[in-house]
Image (tube, grey):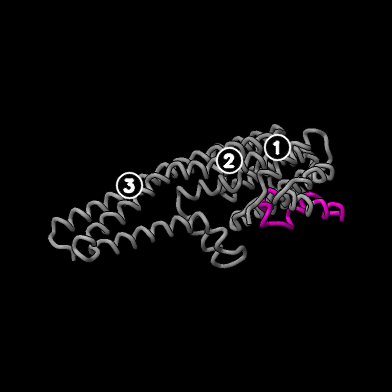
Amino acid sequence: MRSVDRELVRELRRFAAAGLTVKDALIALAEAAGRLGAVARGLLADIEAGASLGEAMSKRPRAITPVYAALVEAGERSGRLVEALDTALLDIEHTRELRRTLLRQSAYPLAVLALALFLPPLSLALTFGRLPSYFGRNVALTIVVLLVVALIVLGPRVFPRGTALRRAYERLLLGVPFLRRTIVDSALWRPLHLEGALLAAGLSFEESLPLARRTIGWEVLRERWDSWLASIRSGGRAADGLGAIGILDADALGALRRAEQAGALDRELADVGAEMRARAFERLTIGFKLLPIFIYLLIAMTLISIVLEVLGGPVS
């Protein structure tokens, strides 16, 4: 089922900027056609029954991504709904840009790879009456590579939360140096940015950290976030607690320690979150640029196999 994240968040932000209440905004959106109108009508019914907007959104994980429901609920609790909607919209656009980058970087080389895999073998099959010996080997290798890439990208949807497979999948990816830093930045920029906003709104760590935690999709990183809260409850300083769980680099931790001493931790947390988002986007973009190179290597391997097959004599 297609989510309505972008349309819903964008329209709620527009109505909020115009001074409308959430209920009035949903009444207006309920008149929309299609999926957005249906979701808005459901949200309106829940709100009229006493639920908050975030609670109503969280009941519809197939239509609204849970992380955005958590952001909205945190915004409502802190009195910063507009800022929460801004953060959600920024994240949605960031995700859309990553998808467009992936398509741009990989569509053409994937098409060339498909042609290199199938057209020469079929031509040789018509000439000699059978497929060349390298065909099955190269196709099998390509399928394995594509399955691995798909597993990395779609793993969070394939492995249910709370299962041993999900935890093993997360620990495996977090053990890969390049992937680890990218995953940590991508998964934690939202909660850190949100934590800064919640602290600025006057919430305590006891109130804000559980709210910000709900925006973390990786269970292993949630456990580290819980360790941070436990450290603060035991009387530790916030920056030291973050350092102990090992999710930030030395430069970010140094800046947070200085900000905590100066009483500006909320702003620095928001800034660190923004820096992590930019860094994650940069790393993912690099990864997408490397993907075509890998695909072209597969194409080169296929062409070399064709040459060796032809020069080696009859097709076996």
**Quarter of the rendering occupied by the C terminus:** bottom left
Q: Is residue 69 left or right of residue 79?
A: left
Q: Earlier in the sequence, mark 2 or mark 1?
A: 2
Q: Tag 1: Cα neighbours inside 10 Å, few (<14), some, or many (≥20)? A: many
Q: Are marks 2 and 1 in contact (CB under 8 Å)?
A: no
As helix, strand or loop, the secondary structure at mark 1 comes to helix
User: Which residue: 30% across, 64% down?
Assistant: 136
Q: In this view of the protein, which residue sits in the foreground, 226 or 300?
A: 300
Per the model, the C-alpha gap separating discs 2 and 3 is: 27 Å
Q: Is residue 83 left or right of residue 309?
A: right
| Residue on which disc 2 sits | 94
From the image, state whether disc 1 or disc 3 is nearer to you: 3
Query: Which quadrant holds residue 159?
Result: bottom right
As helix, strand or loop, the secondary structure at mark 3 comes to helix
Residue 40 placement (x, y as % from top left): 76, 49
Q: Type of residue at label 2? A: His
Residue 207 placement (x, y as % from top left): 77, 49
Residue 45 placement (x, y as % from top left): 83, 54
Q: Tag 2: Cα neighbours inside 10 Å, few (<14), some, or many (≥20)? A: some
> Magenta stretch?
44-68
**In the rendered image, the vertical position of residue 132 relative to residue 268, given as above or below:** below
**In the rendered image, the vertical position of residue 270 relative to residue 221, given as above or below:** above
Q: Is residue 18 left or right of residue 163?
A: right
| Residue on which disc 3 sits | 296
| Residue on which disc 1 sits | 266
User: Which residue: 35% across, 49% down?
Assistant: 295
From the image, state whether disc 2 or disc 1 is nearer to you: 2
Q: Earlier in the sequence, mark 2 or mark 3?
A: 2
Q: In this view of the protein, which residue sits in the foreground, 105 or 83?
A: 105
As helix, strand or loop, the secondary structure at mark 2 comes to helix
Tell me, for residue 168, which label it has, or none.
none
